[in-house]
Image (cartoon, grey):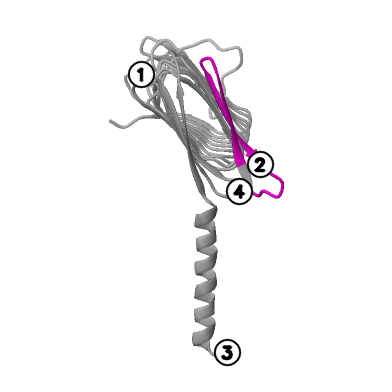
Amino acid sequence: MDYRQCATRTTLIVMLVTATVVVCQTRKEFRYTVGPHASVSVVNQYGPITVTPAPGNQVVVTAVLHSDKVEIDQSQSANRVELISHLLPGSTSDSGRVDYEVLVPPDASVSLHSSTGPLRAEKLHGDVTLEGATANVDVHDISNAHVHVKTLDGPVILSNISDGHVEITSISGNVTLDEVSGPLVQVSSNSGKILYTGDFGSGGEYSLMSHTGDIDANVASYASFDVIARSIKGRVENDFLLGPKHTPFAIKAGSAFAGTLNKAASSVKLSSFSGKIHLRKRQP
């Protein structure tokens, strides 16, 4: 067999494999009529889920199944819609993949679960719950809602979250918060880094905790908060001139600091066991 014959046969094999993949993909669409404050849940073992708002009272789900080794169990009970990717015997992470695109009324509450993701939700004002293992999580432009995120090592990015009740738990994934504010913002990570950029809102409680990961808070000079920052074995740095504040522990330069800025409207706690903590003055 000469090179030309080998190349031709290889090309044919690739074409046949590609054609098989295309044929095995199935596109399905589901529509549900719901009332105000509907609840929508999507459980997907493998593959992305994206949720965006749409006007009206319809939930529209478009799903692309990558093989016949997975099917979708779906149901509606009153104002609750549920979809589950049901893996069949012999399925793998590739053959069991389903890609979901979900349109919901803006006031709907959504719950998304995927091991691999990515998971994405935007421009909603209903509660949002996202859970994954290695899934990337992206939530932005959410207002007046609860946002709950749980991951093992997938990175988490939240941006433009206003008046939110935010709780994030991650084992080793990095967590990035950009312009996130609300009455309660809590981040807990074992080894992932935490990056916060914003002004800590007005009148909220903010708690950023990582066991071994670094915490970097870039805060505007006009922000109003009181702060306690402490790392048992890591270094702690502060760029602000803070007013005095009483603490239940002794302040030690380089490992802990506390104080107030402006009217101290919000309460901020930054804590780590061995990670570094830096409260930075955000550049205009």
Query: Would residue 123 appear left or right of 173 to someone viewing this image?
Result: left
Q: Main secondary structure of the magenta part?
A: strand
Label 4 belongs to which residue? 68
Q: Which residue is drawn at 38% across and 15% down?
A: 224
- Nearest to the eye among marks 4 and 1: give it: 4
Label 4 or label 3, whichever comes before in sequence order: 3
Q: How crowded is mark 2: few (under 14 residues within 10 Å), some or many (20 or more)?
A: many
Q: Where is residue 8 in the image (x, y as percent from the top left)?
A: 50, 80
Label 2 or label 3, whichever comes before in sequence order: 3
Q: How crowded is mark 3: few (under 14 residues within 10 Å), some or many (20 or more)?
A: few
Label 1 belongs to which residue? 223
Label 2 belongs to which residue? 87
Give the alpha-carbon distance from disc 1 to disc 3, as whole Å: 74 Å
Give the alpha-carbon distance from disc 2 to disc 4, as whole Å: 9 Å
Q: Is 84 covered by the magenta stretch? A: yes
Q: Position of residue 81 (x, y in %)?
A: 53, 23
Q: Is 106 covered by the magenta stretch? A: no
**Does residue 224 lie above or below 87 as drawn?**
above
Label 2 or label 4, whichever comes before in sequence order: 4
Q: How crowded is mark 4: few (under 14 residues within 10 Å), some or many (20 or more)?
A: some
> In the structure shown, which secondary structural element does the residue marked by tag 1 occupy?
loop
Query: Would residue 63 appear left or right of 172 to someone viewing this image?
Result: left
In the picture, the quarter occupied by the C terminus is top left
Residue 284 got which mark? none
Residue 1 got which mark? 3
- Nearest to the eye among marks 2 and 1: give it: 2
> In the structure shown, which secondary structural element does the residue marked by tag 3 occupy?
loop
Q: What residue span does the magenta drawing correspond to?
A: 71-92
- Could you say which quadrant of the image residue 37 lies in? top left
